[in-house]
Amino acid sequence: MGRILTETVPMRDGVKLFTTIHFPEGEGPFPVLLVRNLYRGRGSIAAAQPVTEQGVALVEQDVRGSGRSEGRWEEPWIQEADDGEDCLKWIASQAWCNGRIAMRGASYLGASQWFAARSGREELVAIAPGVAPCNYHESPKYQGGAFILQQNIVWALGTWQRNVVPETEQKPFEEEALSRHLPLRDVDEAAGLGVVPFWRAWLDHPCYDAYWRRFDLASFVDRIQAPAFIWSGWFDIYTQGALDSFLLMRNSSGSEKARRLTRCVIGPWTHGEELGELPRGDDFSREKHVDVPAEAFLVSLLKEQETASSAPLRYFMFGTNEWCSADTWPPDGVRERNFYLHSGGAANSRFGDGVLSEEFPGGEVPDCFISDPHNPVPTTGGHGICVVNGSHDQTEVEQRSDVLVYTSAPLRSPLFIAGRVTVLLYASSTAPDTDFTAKLIDLYPDGRVFNLANGILRARYRRSMEQPELLQPGEICEFRIDLWSIANCFLPGHRIRLEIAGSDFPEFSRNSQTGGSIADDVELRVARQTVFHDGDRRSCLILPVLERGLLRQ
């Protein structure tokens, strides 16, 4: 084993960041793999990784305000732009570095790579960001205009407590009580943390604006020179972010090599927790499909041994439980098919009369349900962190009368979908603002009910995330709910099901339904929602259907 060196590396403002270097055997200079970490304990030193056995030096640095580094962790993610660039410059100036650096890591460690890569420094030759955001407004802070609640309470406030609050003053959070606390703006104080600057800033910027544009990969992807190995899971909070990052890098990054060599893997995983109950076969290990190829990708570029024979995108297809390949997303050959909502006006719960079919609706009466933020529909799976996530049986939640359920006839042949799922809803509300949620379900012949994709739309953002517009109570409006992407084969005998509701709590904050500030409201109002499906207002589920003959294994 080679020697270990620790350094305190100065940033441009004088703050020093604790850094550990693991050297391989032999004489340098060496290529370098850099990991910038938020999660190390205050007294820990990084452990060596097998990459040193391949002649690569490993550098691990505690990001500003964490571990043994100086400074305060007050500007999550964005602070990693300048600090990441300064770290790259410092490594490149060391005699033991041969001028070639790669980065790897997941979640915050993945995000730190994107911001370091924004510098465009030529020493950075490859990155491997896993389960990391793309447009930070659309996750992890908001989705469809609704504030992502419990993840931000547990992760963001928890990380602040761990890195800023003295250990003797740290106390466990009461997550359920904090999730229900109003106003949202004061949750940081209710947690015993005082005022947390970024918590307040996120709530002060509910729209996509200049504040969030700084965090959006689309705003700086053209400056990135290094190819990326991007990975995520179908039930991660960053599923769509990974696919969007892949497309941005392939189409708009700042070098021909980055556009040509960037790769992506989307597997049957969540962010880090177990997937849930949805069957997925045996071939799902991250090690096989992410860790091994990611390291090979990084090492090959560090050693200038360019290899990119694999398909640009590898993704897991539920149902048939197989790995598939594509050149882009959605895969070539996908076409949209509309499955329209039908009922006799009583689609409430799984015991109702809601139907999905490709036939146009006629003169049908609408469905109604009550949205009560005092008794919100509970989160029962989906995309998330620090909340029930993954895929689970939905039978219990489908018994609620405030959940509309629409189900197709049993399928006679396999139906493959691969791409972004959308629900087009024509609806009205008695409230000036409200939420509509949608959930795509695979209903098994034995009665099991597994969620595949979910989404939410806060009504005031139905036309734009930049310019909110309240509802006129009773006015029928068009709502397009983005359920993000999924790949699934609905097998013969299975049914397609769609759930429509008015909340998904505590994954998302409750809509007060007053039309006031979600950050500051303490009043909650009940609303009556009406969903239309007739000849003039064809509410439907839009599926990205992939012809089997175009499926690449």
Image: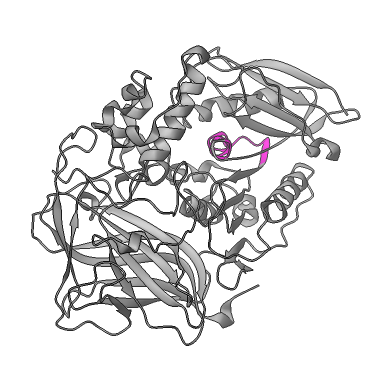
- Residue 390: give x, y in percent of width and height: 49, 54
Residue in the image at 70% along x and 48% along y: 291
Which quarter of the picture shows residue 507?
top left
Residue 157 to residue 287: above or below: above
- Residue 533: give x, y in percent of width and height: 20, 74
- Residue 451: give x, y in percent of width and height: 44, 62
- Count of residue discs: 0
Q: Nearer the viewer, residue 548 or 101?
A: 548
Residue 13 to residue 140: above or below: above
Query: Magenta residues, as a range?
Result: 109-125
Q: Nearer the viewer, residue 41 or 244?
A: 41
Residue 540 falls within the magenta-colored stretch: no
Residue in the image at 37% along x and 71% along y: 497
Residue in the image at 53% along x and 19% along y: 65
- Which color scheme is applied? one colour
Is residue 449 left or right of 314 when viewed as pictured? left
Is residue 248 left or right of 97 when viewed as pictured? left
On the rendered image, what quadrant is the C terminus found in? bottom right
Q: Nearer the viewer, residue 17 or 102?
A: 17
Q: Is residue 514 visible?
A: yes
Is residue 177 left or right of 448 when viewed as pictured? left
On the rendered image, what quadrant is the N terminus found in? top right
Q: Nearer the viewer, residue 335 or 172?
A: 172
Residue 111 falls within the magenta-colored stretch: yes
Residue in the image at 39% along x and 58% along y: 454
Q: Is residue 204 visible?
A: no
- What is the residue that sits farthest to the right in this orientation? 26
Residue 532 to residue 485: above or below: below
- Residue 190: give x, y in percent of width and height: 32, 24
Which quarter of the picture shows residue 259?
bottom right
